[in-house]
């Protein structure tokens, strides 16, 4: 049993107030300055506002191209994408699926929706992704899949994961919720496993407000996902169902926004990378700050600019967050690992020390595409300045 779980958990969210800077800097806000309004207006003018309409197919085709895959399937959220992928691949009751302990809870929940069992592996301290050297010891005869998470935009070690999957005949489902545009050794995420799953929430690099996407090069998987996302209606007759389906459809309105976003895909990705470069230059060599990981041959797109506040900094992570909030700067603490979540109390007796330390010390700074150079300089100055208190 953990001695004191509360010591690892972040404090309640600090109240962000407008300061002398003149505005609040949100942790992330979308940039909708392309053809989003034009395309949404077209939906309204033509009355195609639900889950049918031309923008669905156009968005799927454009997104597939961005990820370098043959097929993309829209759905209602990143969580729905994960659930659809598991269902389309036939994951069922009591199957085991290996995931990182350090991830957003949706990864574990999607497995639980299928009455399957998430099996946790600690993080790699150098990358914050799943420690691929600890996966094999968790594989049993019930293991059916691995879900690597490309944490905060850095691809997991897909080479070793693919080798393990091939050796043990396992499926690979990429949780690429935060990583559209990231690359592993020249190959884009979303096409590195059997299925890729993306979130299109408002803070993601490509957004539809709410939404998700499945990517794959397997026509059968794509077809099954499309069937399941819309109640599994049969083509033979209406209200006739051969499978247990879901209502996970995306609307034409959302797809219209998504298409406009993909038209500026490269610019939106580069904005995150540019922000990270600016922060790195301003925060490097600051005692007590651990910068986001970089791995040779792997393109980190820095969905959120993520740092560690270690004991050498002089302030705890939570105290720093409160100080920044008083200066109008919104931040977020890192994920709380799955084994510390109340609804997964069955994992309490397991220890994942790297995931726990990331939870205790990690936060991300404002990272969206609307940030200006002045904004980043202000945030960085507030982090390092003794006056931040």
Image (spheres, rainbow, N blue to C red):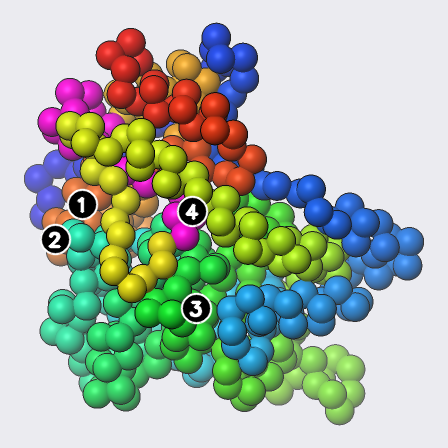
Which of 79 and 328 lies nearest the eye of the viewer?
Answer: 328
Answer yes or no: do the residues labelled 1 and 2 have beta carbons within 8 Å?
yes
Instruction: Tell me the residue that label 1 is attached to.
Output: 356
Q: CA distance from mark 4 to mark 1?
A: 27 Å
Depth check, mark 4 against mark 1: the one in front is 4
Rendered position, 356 above or below 281: below
SS class of the residue under badge 4? helix
Q: Nearer the viewer, mark 1 or mark 2?
A: 1
- The residue singled out by tag 4 in the image is 273
Q: Quadrant of residue 100?
A: bottom left
> In the image, which is nearer the foreground, mark 4 or mark 2?
4
Task: Examine the rendered structure and indicate whether residue 220 appears above or below residue 314.
Answer: below
Location of residue 265 in the rendering, given as x and y in whole percent from the top left corner: 58, 56
Element under label 2?
A: loop
Disc 1 or disc 3, which is closer to the eye?
3
In the depicted view, which residue is nearer to us: 216 or 385? Answer: 385
- Asked whether residue 70 appears in the rendered view, the answer is yes
The disc label shown at residue 351, or none: 2
Q: Residues within 10 Å of mark 3 (few under 14, many from 20)?
A: many
Regarding mark 3 in the picture, which secondary structure is present there?
strand
Residue 374 at x, y percent in the picture: 48, 23
Residue positioned most to the front: 281
First reached walking from the N terminus: tag 1 or tag 2: 2
Q: CA distance from mark 4 to mark 2?
A: 34 Å
Please give the range of residues in magenta: 301-317
- Does residue 95 appear in the picture of this structure? no
Q: CA distance from mark 1 to mark 2?
A: 8 Å
How far across and how far down the image is residue 357, in percent?
Answer: 17, 42
Q: Residue at x 12, y 49 (%)?
A: 353
| Residue displayed at 66% across by 57% down | 263
**Residue to which mark 3 is pinned:** 188
């Amino acid at each position: 049993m953990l001695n004191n779980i509360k010591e690892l958990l972040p404090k309640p969210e600090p109240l962000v107030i407008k300061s002398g800077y003149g505005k609040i800097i949100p942790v992330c806000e979308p940039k909708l300055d392309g053809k989003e309004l034009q395309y949404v207006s077209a939906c309204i003018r033509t009355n195609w506002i639900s889950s049918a309409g031309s923008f669905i197919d156009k968005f799927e085709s454009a997104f597939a191209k961005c990820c370098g895959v043959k097929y993309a399937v829209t759905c209602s959220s990143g969580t729905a994408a994960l659930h659809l992928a598991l269902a389309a691949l036939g994951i069922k009751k009591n199957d085991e699926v290996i995931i990182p302990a350090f991830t957003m809870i949706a990864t574990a929940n999607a497995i639980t929706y299928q009455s399957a069992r998430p099996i946790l592996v600690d993080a790699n301290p150098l990358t914050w992704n799943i420690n691929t050297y600890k996966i094999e010891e968790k594989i049993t005869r019930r293991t059916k899949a691995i879900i690597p998470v490309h944490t905060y935009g850095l691809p997991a070690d897909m080479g070793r994961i693919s080798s393990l999957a091939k050796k043990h005949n396992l499926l690979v489902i990429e949780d690429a919720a935060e990583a559209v545009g990231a690359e592993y050794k020249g190959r884009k995420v979303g096409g590195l496993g059997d299925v890729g799953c993306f979130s299109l929430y408002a803070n993601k690099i490509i957004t539809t407000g709410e939404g998700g996407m499945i990517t794959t090069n397997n026509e059968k998987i794509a077809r099954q996902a499309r069937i399941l996302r819309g109640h599994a209606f049969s083509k033979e007759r209406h209200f006739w169902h051969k499978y247990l389906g879901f209502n996970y459809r995306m609307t034409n309105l959302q797809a219209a926004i998504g298409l406009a976003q993909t038209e500026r895909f490269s610019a939106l990705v580069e904005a995150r990378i540019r922000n990270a470069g600016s922060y790195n230059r301003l925060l490097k060599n600051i005692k007590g700050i651990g910068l986001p990981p970089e791995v040779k041959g792997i393109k980190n797109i820095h969905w959120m600019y993520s740092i560690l506040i270690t004991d050498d900094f002089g302030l705890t992570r939570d105290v720093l967050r409160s100080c920044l909030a008083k200066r109008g700067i919104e931040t977020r603490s890192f994920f709380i690992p799955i084994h510390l979540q109340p609804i997964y109390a069955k994992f309490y007796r397991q220890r994942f020390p790297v995931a726990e330390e990331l939870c205790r010390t990690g936060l991300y700074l404002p990272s969206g595409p609307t940030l200006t150079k002045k904004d980043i300089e202000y945030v960085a100055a507030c982090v390092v300045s003794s006056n931040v208190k």
